[in-house]
Amino acid sequence: MFESAGQYEGLVNIIFLAATAAIAVHAIRFRDANGESDWVRLLFGTIAAVFFFKVLFGDVLNLVGI
């Protein structure tokens, strides 16, 4: 039933990496009109960065086996 599930794994990983990288960079670099950062955006930006590096090192580069 799921024999072709791995066929698109590379494409899904690349799309996931691009999305999480964009979210992390935007959230971490965001500043309001006063030049201050919002702690909620920093929190979710770092969470997105963690997932980015987990997929990059674990699934794409196969350096870490978690």
Image (spheres, grey):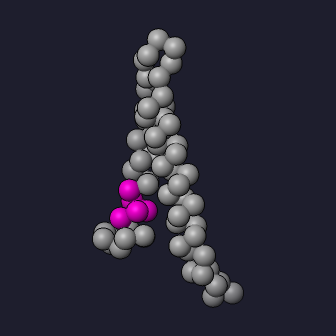
* Percent coordinates x, y for residue 46 in the rendering: 40, 41
User: At x 52% / y 43%, what residue is drawn?
Assistant: 23
Q: Residue furthest top?
A: 34
Q: Is residue 9 above or below residue 52?
A: below
Question: Is residue 40 something one can see in this rendering?
Answer: no
Of the pair 29 and 42, the residue shown nearer to us: 29
Question: Is residue 52 something one can see in this rendering?
Answer: yes
User: At x 57% / y 60%, what residue is drawn?
Assistant: 15
Q: Is residue 20 above or below residue 64?
A: above
* Percent coordinates x, y for residue 3 in the rendering: 63, 88
Residue 29 falls within the magenta-colored stretch:
no
User: At x 38% / y 56%, what residue is drawn?
Assistant: 53
Q: Residue furthest left?
A: 63
Write down the region rendered in magenta: 53-57
User: At x 43% / y 26%, what residue is drawn?
Assistant: 39
Quadrant that contains the N terminus: bottom right
